[in-house]
Amino acid sequence: MALLIALLAFGAAAPSSEDPAAKQHLESALSLYEAKDYVKAAREFEQAYQSDPQPELLFAWAQSLRLGGNCDAALPLYRRFLEAAVADEGVARAKKQIERCEEVTQARAAVPAPAPAPAPVVAPPPPTVEAPRRWYADPLGDTLAALGVAAAATSATLFVLGSGSATAAGRAMTYGEFSVFASRASLERTSGWVAAASGAALLTGAIIRWVVRSGAESARVEGTAWGVGPQGLSLLCRF
C-alpha cells in the first residue's frame, strides 16, 4: 500500500483490507494508475471500495476520476471522503482537489454553448404552370366547327341541286314540268341559304370558343367576311 500513498500523494495511513476481492481490485487499480490509465483504474478502485469501503479508497477513486477528466463524478467522492474520519493532511489534500475540480466545472459552465445550427432553408416548390391548351383541342369548339362545316357542305349541295332544278325548268316541254322544277329549285335554294346561315353561325361560335379557350388576350378578329353563292359558303377570316 506504500505505492498507493506515493501515487495519490495521500497523507493518511493506507488501508489494510483482508478481503480477497478488494485486494485483487486494488492491485489491478494500482497497476492501471501507474500506467496512467485513469479511467480503468477508477473502475477498479470502485470495485475495491464496494468490497471494502475504506475512506482511503474513496480518495483514490476520486483522484482517478479527476485525472481521467471526470470532475463531475469526482467531486461527490471527495466530499464523502471529507465526511469520514481521516487525518488532517488528508482533509487538506481533499479540499485542494475539490477546489481544482470546481474551477474546471465553473470554467466549463462559463463557455457559451455553441449556437444551434440554422434551420435548413427549404425552397418552395416551383409553381405549377399548366400547359396552354391548343386552340384546336377544345371539344366544344371542335364540335361547333364540325357542325358548321357539315352545314356549309349541305348548303353547297343544296345550291348545286337548286341550280340543276332551275336548268331542268328552263328545258321543260310543258308548263307542268316547268312548275315542278321551278318549285323544286326555289325550295333547294332556300334550304341552301338556311344551311349556309346555320353553318356561318356554327363556325363563328367555334372561332369565338377557340379564341376564348386559348387565353390569348392579344388575339382579336380583325375581319370576317362571309360569301354565299351558287358554289356554296366561303369564309374569309383574318386574325
Image (cartoon, rainbow, N blue to C red):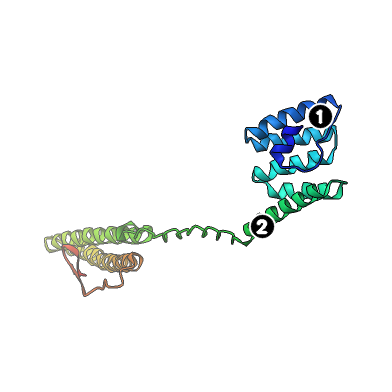
Q: Where is 39 relative to 223, above or below?
A: above
Q: Three-letter amino acid code at disc 2?
A: Glu
Q: Three-letter amino acid code at disc 1?
A: Ala
Residue 209 location, quadrant: bottom left
The residue nearer to you, when weighing 167 against 51, is 51
- Say which residue appears at 66% left-offset and 57% top-offset: 103
User: Closer to the N terminus: mark 2 or mark 1?
Assistant: 1
Q: Which residue is mark 2?
A: 103
The residue nearer to you, when weighing 28 against 206, is 28
Tell me if mark 1 has few (under 14), some (14-19) or many (20+) residues whose alpha carbon lies within 10 angstroms of its own.
many
> Which element carries disc 1, helix, strand or loop?
helix
Residue 179 location, quadrant: bottom left
Question: On the rendered structure, is 126 left or right of 42?
Answer: left
Q: Where is 209 relative to 87, above or below?
A: below
The residue nearer to you, when weighing 147 against 4, is 4
The C terminus is located in which quarter?
A: bottom left
Q: Which residue is mark 1?
A: 22
